[in-house]
Image (cartoon, coloured by chain):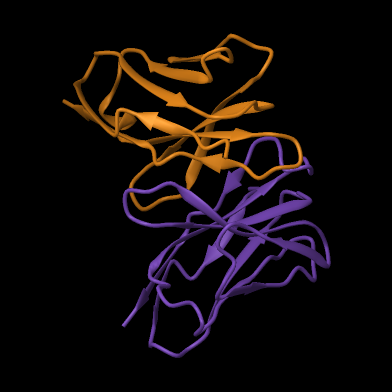
Amino acid sequence: SQQGEEDPQALSIQEGENATMNCSYKTSINNLQWYRQNSGRGLVHLILIRSNEREKHSGRLRVTLDTSKKSSSLLITASRAADTASYFCATDKLGQNFVFGPGTRLSVLP
Amino acid sequence: DGGITQSPKYLFRKEGQNVTLSCEQNLNHDAMYWYRQDPGQGLRLIYYSQIVNDFQKGDIAEGYSVSREKKESFPLTVTSAQKNPTAFYLCASSLMTGLTGELFFGEGSRLTVL
C-alpha cells in the first residue's frame, strides 16, 4: 500500500508560531497533495507537489518532498486561529487510487 | 459558482432502510469519487467513476451502490447490507482521469443510523 501517515496526530501551538506536519508513505508516487478540513466540512486542496519537485510554496505554506525517505512536510508559517483544522496528505500513483492518511489535528490558540 | 453540491447535509436512517446521497458537480469534471470518513480517521474510497455509465469499486464498496447516468451526477446508495453505515460521506471530483490531479470536495453528508 502507498498509505500516507501524518505525524503528529495532534498539534497545539500559539498564534504566530510555525506549525510543521509530516507525512510518510510506503511506495513510489506520482504526486503528493496536502488538504485541509475544517470540522464537519469538506476537504480543501492546499498544494500539490510532484515526485520530481523538492519544495513548493504557496502563501504561508511550504511543502517539501524527499522521495528517498518517502516523506513530506507541510510548514505553516505565522499561524492564525483560522488555521485550526485537520490536515491530510494524499498520495497518488497513475492508475491507482488516491490514498489519504489519518490526518494531523492542528489547534492554533489565540 | 462552480463546485460540488452534496445533499442532504444530515440524514437519519432506520436499520434496514436504504438511503441515497446526492452529489452534483458543475465543474465539467470526468472523474467522481465517494469517500467515507469515520471519526479521527482518514478517507476511505467507496466507489469512483472516470466516465459516464462506468464505475469501479474502491476499498470498501460492500453495502454501497452507485450510478453514473450523467456526467454531473454520482449518487451513492447506502443499502441495508452495510452493517455500520453511520459516518461522514464525502463526494469529490477531479478534472484529470487516471486517478491523479487535484480533488474538489463537497461539504459532506452525515448519515446516522437510529
Whether residue A30 can be seen here: yes
Q: How many marks?
A: 0
Q: Residue at x 38, y 70 (%)?
A: B86
Please tell me the colour of chain B.
purple
Task: Please identify the quarter of the rendering in which residue A81 is found.
Answer: top left
Q: Residue at x 41, y 50 (%)?
A: A41
Please tell me the colour of chain A.
orange
Q: Residue B102: x, y in percent?
A: 65, 36
Q: Residue at x 46, y 26 (%)?
A: A24
Q: Which residue appears farthest toward the top when viewing the image?
A: A54
Task: Please identify the quarter of the rendering in which residue B47 is found.
Answer: bottom right
Give the answer, above or below, for where A29 lies relative to B45.
Answer: above
Q: Residue at x 79, y 51 (%)?
A: B30
Q: Residue B73: x, y in percent?
A: 71, 65
- Closer to the camera, A52 or B8? A52
Q: Quadrant of the N terminus of chain A?
A: top right
Q: Residue B58: x, y in percent?
A: 63, 58
Task: Please identify the quarter of the rendering in which residue B79 is found.
Answer: bottom right
Give the answer, above or below, for where A35 lies relative to B22.
Answer: above
Q: Quadrant of the C terminus of chain A?
A: top left
Give the answer, above or below, for where A40 lies relative to A15.
Answer: below
